[in-house]
Amino acid sequence: MQFYDRQKEMDFLRGLKGGFFVAIVGRRRVGKTRLINEAFPERIYLFVPEDKEESMTASEWSEEVKRHIPMPESRSMTEILDFLFRSGNLVFIDEFQNLGKVRKGMVSDIQRLVDAHKENLRLVIAGSYVSIMKKMLTDSRNPLFGRVDFIIKLKELEFPVVTRMLRDMGYGIKEAVEFHSVLGGMPKYYEILEKVRGNPRRFVEKMFIEEPAPFRYEAEVILRNEIGSEYRNYFSILEALCLGKNTMSGMSDYLGKEARSITKYLDFLINDYELVQRKVPVTEDFRRSKMGRYFIVNPFFRFWSYFVYRNISILEEGDAERAKEVFRMDFDQYVSKHFEELARDIVRNFLDYRKVGSWWNRRGDEIDIVALNEKKKEILFGEVKWRNRPVGWNVVEELIGKKDLVQWHNEERKEKFLIVSKSGFTKKCLERMESEGIMHWDLKDIERMVAGARDA
């Protein structure tokens, strides 16, 4: 598949001079290996499996090195690395977090070699499991603490890049929104889509529901490798969140556990694995607010929690038709929440507001988009609709009716409004919005904006 985006990372890596030690951290499937292979085509690639003895791994490394340069016989991984670090060749160690499973003390050996060959060292390491790699590199008790020159956190591809990938495959903006709600910005999954093809709904049914369902256990395997033996506690929290139980009390009630007993699991999902995020109404102080809600921020894991994990008994019984029925009934509702997130991102990137989020209160009132510009005392209220009929003026009236609920410079602020609609607007609604200066976006507008962003 064509290599997309990552130009800033490529420029940085290719611009490095002299000796360096770089770590690339990020989720599995986010494209770490592809990035390094594109940036350094002449690298010596050393893969660290998690289930092989050191002698077997050393043998495989030795064969790989000999493909590039002559090398004396070496019996250990440490000897091979010592030779490579001395030689000044660029070395790429992939799945670095597995070194401790191959042999205890291996990371300490690398620390000694890094210190000994600092002048000649040209080393890049990458690891799939974010929390483990973070601890290996940033925990002062770890041998490699302070040795890495640069840590690059590789994030998912942004939505404008995903739309370009999908456009090149022949998909439009509606399909881009739906695919992104399932696959997020993970490049590997779009490589698979390029081979499998199909519209978003058919793709989901083939990959998650119908046997052999190659994606059904993808998220589960990734999470189990990261989380370990207590995975069920984490999975239960994700299930609660995808069902809308996104307050501490809501999770506690749903799981039948005291809030304090789930705190450590939630903290891991937020701070270590960065899979869950706490959000507050945009007008609230993040640290002081008691209105916090928790959300799964990765689309792939959110989709898996919503459609796979909570329906796993149906899937494992082999009742594909029933599973498809559940999916078809709920998919539009699921995509609508994702569409709200994309709309907020577009406001953040294209309009002049410093803070962008959503808003809610304890009575149950909610506004999809609230954006603030403190300097101008300007506030934007937005409503987002993912449905198959055009939006009428009643939607605008409802949004305007909620504006005074938001307490923020109410006596002096300048108010603006935005309606975002998958299926456009009725003629009367469009005419009235035009006359009253109310912003409105349909999918074509969004496509133009993201096309401009990806081509900039």
Image: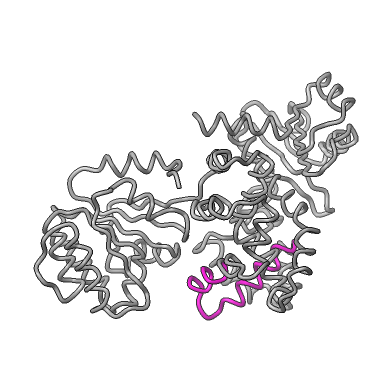
Above-or-below relation of 334 to 445? below
Q: Return the x and y of residue 440 as percentages of the image width and height.
A: 75, 29
Q: Is residue 35 left or right of residue 293?
A: left
Please indicate, yes or no, whether residue 162 appears anywhere in the rendered image: yes
Q: Return the x and y of residue 83 as percentages of the image width and height.
A: 13, 64
Above-or-below relation of 97 to 169? below
Label the magenta part by its dominant secondary structure: helix
269 magenta-colored:
no
Above-or-below relation of 425 to 45? above
Q: Return the x and y of residue 49 as percentages of the image width and height.
A: 35, 72
Q: Between residues 68 and 382, which one lies in front from this camera angle?
A: 68
Q: Between residues 233 and 220, which one lies in front from this camera angle?
A: 220
Above-or-below relation of 21 to 171? below
Extent of the magenta region:
219-244
Query: Which of the 4 quarters of the picture holds residue 4?
Result: top left
Q: Return the x and y of residue 408 as percentages of the image width and height.
A: 73, 37
| Applied colour scheme | one colour
Residue at left 71%, top 68%? Answer: 240
Specify the farthest residue to the left: 72
